[in-house]
Image (spheres, rainbow, N blue to C red):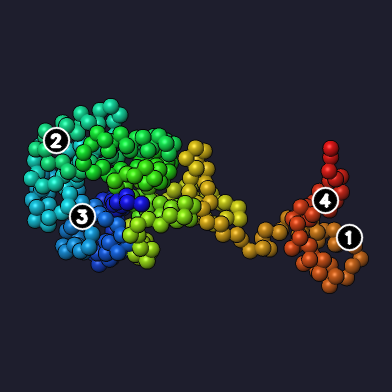
Amino acid sequence: MKTVLTDISLCEGELLPDAKAADIYKYIKSLASAGIRYVEIDRNILQKLRKLPKGIGYIYRVTRPEDVDIVKIYKFNYALIRYSDLFKKIRPDIPVMLEMPFVERAYRQMLGFAQSRLGGRITAVRFCDDFGYKTLGEMRRFVAKIRNTIPIPVDFCPLNSHKTALDCALKLTFSGADCISFTVPQTNRFARLRGYITTLMGVYKIRPDKIDIVGLIGAAMYSDCIFREVEESPREISVPFFSMTSSVNADTGELVPLIPDFMPFKLRNVEYKSALEKMMSKTELDKETSDALVEAVKYYDVDLCSDSVLYGKHKGLKN
């Protein structure tokens, strides 16, 4: 897998009021060691840090005309300019990544207009959109068409408008997308890096190139120290017998468990064990014998211990 990964958490996540500059610095260092190629920052993050960690590329989000001078001083890889800000007539003499929505049949004209406003210095494009639900075949054709019509790198930033961001990110990866943007903390708007890596490794048995798990764990830990996580109600649903590590089915919206984490055996046998105990209570067996029978049966087939069998409601197989 050669898709480049970008972290946009520091611009899209909600920082805690008491987030320390040292922890933000370590967060970026962890992203670098994890193998993330670029991290996006803005004026607020730059003012907090003063000094930027080495070993990772930087995308600086331009929000004011004077930000252009900051980009030149720090020699960032890209100055990110949103399409909605083009009316400000920002004309930077630096590499620009243009962020824009994906509009079918019009994105080339939109890109041409942006280049005329920015002096033709656009060196990368970010499409920030939900892209609609696509099959893998449709996504491959979609990516191939964009690569054939846009001669510069394209960063895809899937929105989670319809709970399909993770599904979209995975299919973009399998379709050979140049770059995909993620957040580490939960934001409800974008695909999460944790879920993406977990799904690739746990479901598809794929380990992304140059991704270091230790660095990824470090980034997740520092993320908990500096970001306020947004609660997402579907994740609070109790999934019987499974852990809460789950994804969302893009077709139905239902939770899909990724890592089975079965609960202790006793909890899984409450129903039939109680039925067995009721039957035992009507016999004249001593407690030691009854306990031995319960212990022996619980390792046998669960169906043999159901109420329908124990109380004669099931009359055998029917033709």
Q: CA distance from mark 4 to mark 1?
A: 16 Å
Q: CA distance from mark 2 to mark 1?
A: 85 Å
Circle 3 residue: 58
Give the image quarter of residue 99.
Answer: top left
Circle 1 residue: 282
Circle 3 or circle 1, nearest the eye: 3
Give the image quarter of residue 133.
Answer: top left
Task: State the SS at label 2.
Answer: helix
| Horizontal arrangement in the rendering, residue 175 relative to residue 295 (left or right) | left
The tag earlier along the polypeptide, 3 or 1, is 3
The tag earlier along the polypeptide, 4 or 3, is 3
x, y (%) of residue 319?
Answer: 84, 37
Q: Between residue 59 and residue 269, name the one nearer to us.
A: 59
Task: State the SS at label 1.
Answer: loop
The tag earlier along the polypeptide, 3 or 2, is 3
Circle 4 or circle 1, nearest the eye: 4
Circle 4 residue: 309
Q: CA distance from mark 4 to mark 3?
A: 66 Å
Circle 2 or circle 1, nearest the eye: 2
Q: CA distance from mark 4 to mark 2?
A: 75 Å
Looking at the image, can residue 72 be seen?
yes
Residue at left offset 26%, top offset 35%: 148
Residue at left offset 34%, top offset 35%: 142
Circle 2 residue: 115
Amino acid under label 2?
Gln
Q: Between residue 42 and residue 165, name the one nearer to us.
A: 165
Residue at left offset 85%, top offset 70%: 289
Q: CA distance from mark 3 to mark 1?
A: 74 Å
